Image (cartoon, grey):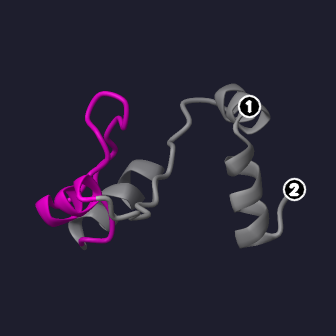
């Protein structure tokens, strides 16, 4: 199974959104979640970045500490 097939499988089963750009499209949220955040609720909405290359992944890891500590907390990687 290719990555695109795996991602499509997850979307077809309702497990994830299709890839969107959080900068240009915003984070996928329901109207209820959007209103809750507007009203001051501190919702956590997990987002996964899809890297276009290993170089981009390395650059993100080097400049975004939460990427490193989230992976370490979840999978014990450093």
As drawn, is 73 to the left or to the right of 22? right
**Disc 2 versus disc 1: distance between alpha carbons?**
14 Å
Q: Which residue is mark 1?
A: 63
Identify which residue is drawn at 24% across, 53% down.
Answer: 38
| Residue at image point 31% right, 40% down | 20
Q: Nearer the viewer, residue 47 or 51?
A: 47
Instruction: Kindly state the secondary structure of the residue where label 2 is placed.
Output: loop
Few, some or many C-alpha atoms within 10 Å of disc 1 (few <14, some 14-19, many ≥20)?
few
Q: What is the count of numbered marks?
A: 2
- Residue 53, position as x, y percentages in the image: 62, 29
Looking at the picture, how far across and down is residue 4, in whole percent? 39, 49
Upstream in the sequence, badge 2 or badge 1?
A: 1
Which of 76/14 is in front?
76
Picture layout, residue 76 above or below residue 2:
below
Q: Residues within 10 Å of mark 2 (few under 14, many from 20)?
A: few
Residue 27, position as x, y percentages in the image:
32, 47
* Secondary element type, mark 1: helix
Magenta part of the protein: which range?
A: 14-39
The label number, if any, that marks residue 78 in the structure image: 2
**Residue lying farthest front?**
40
In the rendered image of this protein, does residue 16 appear above or below residue 24?
below
């Amino acid at each position: 199974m290719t990555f695109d097939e795996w991602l499509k499988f997850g979307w077809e089963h309702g497990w994830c959104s299709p890839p969107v750009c959080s900068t240009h499209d915003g984070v996928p949220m329901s109207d209820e979640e959007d209103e809750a955040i507007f009203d001051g609720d501190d919702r956590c909405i997990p987002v996964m970045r899809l890297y276009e290359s290993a170089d981009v992944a390395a650059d993100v890891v080097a400049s975004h500490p939460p990427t490193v500590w989230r992976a370490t907390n979840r999978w014990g990687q450093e």
